Amino acid sequence: MRLSVMLGLSFVMLACPGSFEAKNPPCESNADCSVEELGSDFPDHVCRASQCYPSASAPGVEPGGDAGPQSVYDAGAAVDTGRTIECRQDDDCEAGEVCIGGYCLESGVPPRPEAGNSDAGGPAPELDAGTPDAGPPAPVLDAGGPTPPNGSSADLAAQSCSSLLADYPELQSGSYWVDPDGAGAVVPIEVFCDMETGGGGWTLVLQRRVGNSNTESCGANLDEFVQGACGTVGALAQTESYSIGRSSRQALVESSSGHWLVVQYGNGNIADPNDAFTLRHDGDVFDLFSEMEVVDTPVQAVCDQDGANCVSESVSFRYAGMGSIQGASCSGVLANETGGGVYGYCTTLEVQLNHGFGDRSGAAEIKVWGVDAGGASSFSERVLIK
């Protein structure tokens, strides 16, 4: 049928030059009026009212007219533009108008519907958060989730001093609440956190007081003091004894990175960095004692208080919960007749306890329970973990 129409059109054009406007080819869409369909003699035609017209002179479609796909979109329902201005390009239109399908339309007319979505009218426009139609902006959620506990109370107990410092780098040394085993059997406890020495984040597990021949206010010997709870962190003057107790200490060990710190304090509670040292050990260095023996626990390394200048070959931690070690040496045997306990580190390079990073000599480097040798009772000592 399309071929017969074209032949008829050719005959009309040859027989009646200039009468094309009266013999417009029929159409259903603009595609039927294209050069490909009608030939080069019908350039720039559009489909209006089921007939092909030159786009510059195509009539408008009156409301209620032909319901074929004759809108400016060439799809969907007919559109009464209300305009009689014909155009070939945007420059032919007035300011604020664009040329679409030979008609000048206001630039606010919606874009051509996408295929398969003519009813939807295209995707909804994206609204700025500040426009009235957008509604209130979505709340910005903390990428880290809920606010971490700050250790200010038992209900806000952190896991450790180290985790507190990681979450709140501005915190100062002082007492905080921690719960090292979370929902485990150990209840939250108030501890002392050293947030300054050796990078901070250390939890105090015990403090040896000054004077009193190196004895403490709790326990009959060193092991009783270390394994039992003693004192409070609210009173940590140099004259006070403190021990966190075995169960809490071991819970801290389980949640720690295996770093131990031993710091001695002289007059005015001033730390002595020359005699401070750190140990790297994943277990509890105070938990291997049995009565009447010296326990040597291999450790990964011993370093200065900043974790530098480490020695890692043949390093151990010596602990005697009661008695003393002959000569305060790394090869000495237990001497039960004097002393109530002692501890310190040993390396193959040193023959005496705690001598690698100390500037004292012999027993002055260690606090032997009940023995005031070398002036060791003139300083206090703290053992911490993180």
Image (tube, helix red, strand yellow):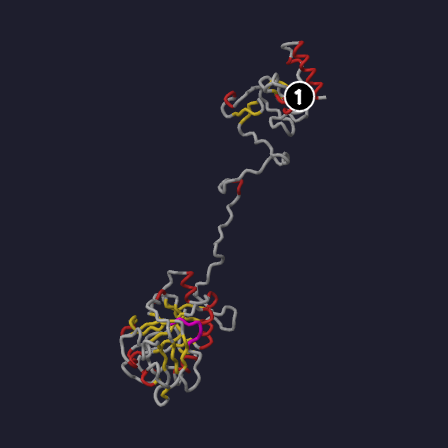
Image quarter of residue 22: top right
Classed neighbour count for the residue bearing mark 1: other residues with Cα under 10 Å, few (<14), some (14–19), many (≥20)? many
Range covered by the magenta-colored residues: 279-285
Q: What residue type is disc 1 on? A: Ala
Residue 380 appearing in the image: no
Would residue 384 appear left or right of 78 to someone viewing this image?
Answer: left
Image coordinates of residue 318 in percent, x first then y, are 38, 79
**Residue in the image at 64% along x and 26% along y:** 78
Residue 364 rendering spot, x and y as whole percentages: 29, 80
Magenta segment, principal secondary structure?
loop
Query: Residue 209, percent across and down?
Result: 33, 78
- Whether residue 90 is visible, yes or no, is yes
Q: Residue furthest right?
A: 1
Q: Is mark 1 on a helix, strand or loop?
A: loop
Residue at left offset 68%, top offset 15%: 9
In the image shown, does 84 or 286 lie closer to the viewer? 286
The answer to if 283 sits in the magenta stretch is yes
Vertically, is 21 above or below 120? above
In this picture, residue 37 sits left or right of residue 265: right
Magenta stretch encompasses residue 218: no
The image quadrant where one finds the C terminus is bottom left
Residue 37 is situated, as x and y percent measured from the top left of the image, at 65, 22
Decide which of 49, 30 is in the foreground and name it: 30
Instruction: Please tell me which residue is depicted at 37% across the width and 60% down the height of the picture.
Output: 170
From the image, tell me which residue sits under label 1: 49
Seen in the picture, residue 284 relative to 121 is either above or below; the reply is below
Q: Quadrant of the N terminus?
A: top right
